[in-house]
Amino acid sequence: MRVKQIIIQKPADLATSLANLKNVAADLLLVFGSVEHFTFPGLRELLQGHFPDAMLLGCSTAGEISADGVDDGTCTITAIKFEQTQLIQGAHNQVVAVGLSGEGLRFGHGSFGGWEPFGPARKVTRCDGNILHELDGEPALEIYRRYLGEHAKGLPASGLLFPFAMLGEDHSAVGLIRTILGIDEASGSLILAGEIDPEGYLRLMHASTDKLVSGAESAAEAASIMAEGAEHSLAILVSCVGRKLVMGDRVDEEVEAVGEVFGKSGILTGFYSYGEISPFAPGASCKLHNQTMTITCLSET
């Protein structure tokens, strides 16, 4: 597997920057950039002109990730040429999927948060999909405000800083976090970024930058182990915008922690998102996560 990557600062620089990849063959092109780049006239045509045999996969972001750290307003283009892997592409409405197969393909994944729980576990007593109405028989918004104290004045935006951990009946974590997207004053309910278990429990969480960086490192270690520590690899990072807001100027540190795990031979790409999809553990089914660093590692033998 061969990987080449360029980072474009301004949409108008696209054609000139692509010239640096004119002799690069690619089966798959990963494109992560700002809205300004994706709405730039002729983007698709330029990419297809330079890589006529490549499948295109990408999206706009809340921040672009590369080995250089985290950027805003840029576009990262990663060209991948596989030697032992076959690709199949499918489209469903507005969702594009690429399937990879081959005996030489090595694949690993990891997804961790780094958030710390506080306060008691509370029973979900009324909910509807992703709408949380009551905890322990009380309006969810009332309880949430009580625990946030001064931070409650900043709702719903401050909800990104205090997500919920989903718990099972025995109060053990199930590996899923739910972020608050909005509040409903009239009903006293919270709007969460994903469905919750109507029979489960929730517990509030908060974070420090050091803990979030450790979570990113744990995700990288899990992905690297599954991929059998390949010498040359591509790591695709999807981290939550809520983590970016918490870490502020130190957000590069979680990308640096991931880079140290994969080493100089590992190429990083990815973006900040509003939800991550991944198994929590090897062999488990994919789930919608909030507030995690989720990593997919690809390599070939």
Image (tube, grey):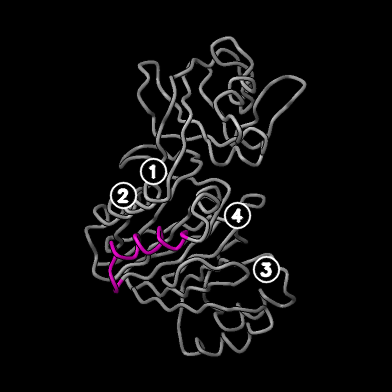
- Counting from the top left corner in percent of width and height, residue 228 is at 22, 58
**The residue under label 2 is which amino acid type?**
Ser
Under circle 3, the secondary element is helix
The earlier-in-sequence mark between 1 and 2 is 1
Distance from Cα at disc 1 to Cα at disc 3: 32 Å
Q: Is residue 263 magenta?
A: yes
Tell me if residue 281 comes above or below residue 140 in the rendering.
below
Distance from Cα at disc 1 to Cα at disc 2: 9 Å
Residue at numbered disc 3: 38
The earlier-in-sequence mark between 2 and 3 is 3
Tell me if residue 15 comes above or below residue 28 in the rendering.
below
Residue at numbered disc 1: 114
Residue at numbered disc 2: 218
Is residue 122 or residue 284 the one in the foreground?
A: 122
- Write the start and end of the magenta stretch as one range: 250-265
Under circle 2, the secondary element is helix
Residue at numbered disc 4: 91
Label 2 near label 4: C-beta < 8 Å? no
**The residue under label 4 is which amino acid type?**
Ala
Distance from Cα at disc 2 to Cα at disc 3: 32 Å
Under circle 4, the secondary element is strand
Distance from Cα at disc 4 to Cα at disc 2: 32 Å
- Counting from the top left corner in percent of width and height, residue 100 is at 41, 59
Report the predominant secondary structure element of the magenta stretch: helix
